[in-house]
Amino acid sequence: MYGLWGFERLKLRMMVVMLLMLVLSLFEQNMSFSSPLNSEGLALLRFKQRMVSDPFGALSNWKEIDGEIDPCSWFGVECSDEKVVILNLKDLCLVGNLGPEFGKLENLKSIILRNNSFSGSIPQEIGELKELEVLDLGFNNFSGPFPSDFGNNLSLTTLLLDNNEFLGNLAPEIYEVKMLSEFQVDENRLTDAATIPSCKSSGFPCIASISDCYSCHMMNE
């Protein structure tokens, strides 16, 4: 009788140990999934899904590999302390729009999307990025109102919105941001989309290198 009871106690202990190991494994997986890099990587993948055209394949390495997401190795993405801090995708002729997933990139200090063909409105979530220092959306096709929350962003130093189709009336708070070292809004072009060259037209603004503009031009012919 005692031998049988001892065997049952041993089985019970083994079951408890196995259950604890399972719980620890699930906890570690959950911690890995909720890590900053993975959540930011998922947000960037959602941004990629909004692309209608990526003519140069710039985002081709934006993908999950062996179940892991490492945005720090992706083109146009820079990290610091394992956090995404810079998104630089200028002069790539990307066609698409921006979405609320930018709110998940709360460590971003610089967003540079200049000289593409992004359209639609600028998400309110971008205005809520408190670490953002540089926002360059010039030479795109953005429309609609500009997020008013930028008036409360004490980190912003550079705001470039020139050459977009229509940004509507910018909130007074935007003009009252005193700490801006560079603030460029070409008001003559805010409502005149017909004369604005973009990556989707036959002419391209040479605001990077001549070779970049030439490449865009040749690809579109």
Image: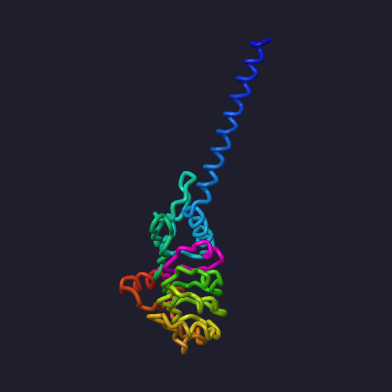
- Residue 59 appears left or right of 101: left
What x and y, as percent, mark residue 57?
42, 60
Find the magenta span and give its range. 92-113
Residue projecting furthest to the front:
2
* Residue 55 seen from this side: yes
The scheme the figure's colours follow is rainbow
Q: How many marks?
A: 0
| Along the line of sight, the residue nearer the viewer: 179 or 112 | 179
Q: Residue at x 48, y 75 (%)?
A: 153
Q: Quadrant of residue 138?
A: bottom left
What x and y, as percent, mark residue 71?
44, 55
What x and y, as percent, mark residue 100?
56, 66
Residue 101 highlighted magenta (yes or no): yes
Residue projecting furthest to the bottom:
188
What x and y, as percent, mark residue 56?
41, 63
Which quadrant is home to the C terminus? bottom left
* Residue 201 seen from this side: no
Which quadrant is home to the N terminus? top right
| Along the line of sight, the residue nearer the viewer: 75 or 132 | 132
| Along the line of sight, the residue nearer the viewer: 86 or 7 | 7
Residue 45 highlighted magenta (yes or no): no
Q: Is residue 186 above or below residue 79?
A: below
Q: Is residue 206 above or below residue 15?
A: below
Q: Is residue 29 above or below residue 171?
A: above
